[in-house]
Structure formats: structure tokens, C-alpha cells
Amino acid sequence: MLPTLRSIFQRDKAQANAGVWQTPAPSSGLRKPPPHAAQMRRQSRGIEQFFSDISGVVGLSVLDFAGASQENIDFLTNLGHKVYTQDLVRSLDDAFGSDPGEQMNPGRIDYFLRTNFDYPADTFGGALLWDAFQFMGPALVNATVDRLYEIMQPKSYMLAFFTSNEKAIEVPSYHFRLIDNKTIQLSDRGLRPSGQVFNNRSLEKLFSKFESVKFFLTRDSLREVIIRR
């Protein structure tokens, strides 16, 4: 049975209020953001395109990999959609720790997929992947994309962010919050090692089983990508 997002959010909120909020220790490859992490709001052509693509449709099941966020929950449910969430970046630390070699371990990859993508085929009409793919090595990202192809519905849409700096060894990680259908808020989570180099050509190859891949280049070195199943 698919878990309901509101029950997950209420559980986490109850833990926080009780003083038992549990946050796993960051891996040694993650540099902590400052105590008051920087936040910024900006327009997002990728977000605008994503919501334009699914406009006029209600009752979709949407994956949101930003973690449980009341802002995202409210925004998506107010559009008439069901929301299922996971903090995919945090799950990377839980599944693989700080050793990049573990991302090539078939057993750990299987655990990661079962933890985050254990849904029936053709379940989702949309997915907000955000920046998590940026921190996956080749074996893991290929397995994850194959699994997404199974659980996404035909003609569904996904949104992912990648750095446009192809020489970067470390790249910023963010919490993403939806403000409206054109605007997002980014909160700094610190620098993380990039899993590999992603450019337009490699992304087209990565999503070659999908119908189309569309790119939006932003001023802040983020490459926003819309993928159509």
C-alpha cells in the first residue's frame, strides 16, 4: 500500500515537537552549510514548464524528492494531486555512506531502489527529482533511471537539476521549496562531491529510453531538465 504523505509529515512534525527529531550524521564527503543556511528565491523555467505540461489534469500521483515539505504538500494538493515524498539526497547517505565505491555495490543499489522506488509500474504522472541525480555515480544513476522508467506513466513528466559547471568536483546541494508555479526557494545544504560529469549529450544518453529531454540553462549554473516519459 502506498503511504500517505500527510501521515508521514504529521509523524515527523510530532517527532520534532517531542524533541526526538532524528537527523543522520552527514557523510564525510558533505560539507555542512553555515548555521544560518543561505536561502534565495528565483524564477525557474523548468518549474514553469513542468506545471504547464501537467496543467488541466487533476488526480495525478506526483513524486517529490525534496523531502517532506508543508509548502510543497500544500501547493501540489491544492492543484488536485496526490503527493509521495522522500529526501533522496539524505537517502544517498543512508544507503551508501561516504564511500563512492559503495554506489557500485549491487546489493546497496538494490536496497536504495527498494527504499525509494518501491511502487507499481505506471504509478506516477509527475516527478520532481531536483538535484539528487547530480550526486550519483554511473551504475547507480543508470539503475535509478531504469526504475523510474517503470514506475512513471507514459507521457508523464520529470524535472531534474544538474550543475552546468562540467569541471566542478564539488557542487552545492539544496532544499527545494515551491513558492508558485514559476518560483522556487533554494536553501543551501552544503557542498557535496559530484557523482560524475553531466552535460547535454550525456543526459540525452541517460534518458534515451524516454520520449524527449528539454534543457533550460539558468544564470546560477543550474541546468534544469524536463524529461517526458
Image: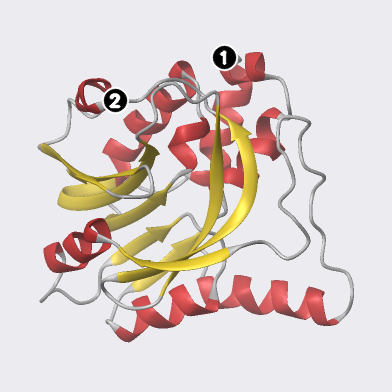
Q: Secondary structure at mark 1?
A: helix
Residue at the farthest right position: 19
**Count of numbered badges drawn on the protein:** 2
- Residue at 56% across / 66% down in the picture? 39
Q: Residue at x 48, y 42 (%)?
A: 132
Q: Quadrant of the C terminus?
A: top left
As drawn, 118 above or below 107? below
The residue located at (37%, 66%) in the rendering is: 42
Q: Amino acid at mark 2?
A: Asn
Residue 112 horizontal/vertical position (percent)? 57, 34
Of the pair 156 and 52, the residue shown nearer to us: 52
**In what element is the residue under mark 2?**
loop
User: Residue beneath label 2, please?
Assistant: 199
Q: Is residue 51 visible?
A: yes
- Please give the label number shown on residue 125: none
Instruction: Tell me the amino acid under the disc marked 1.
Output: Met
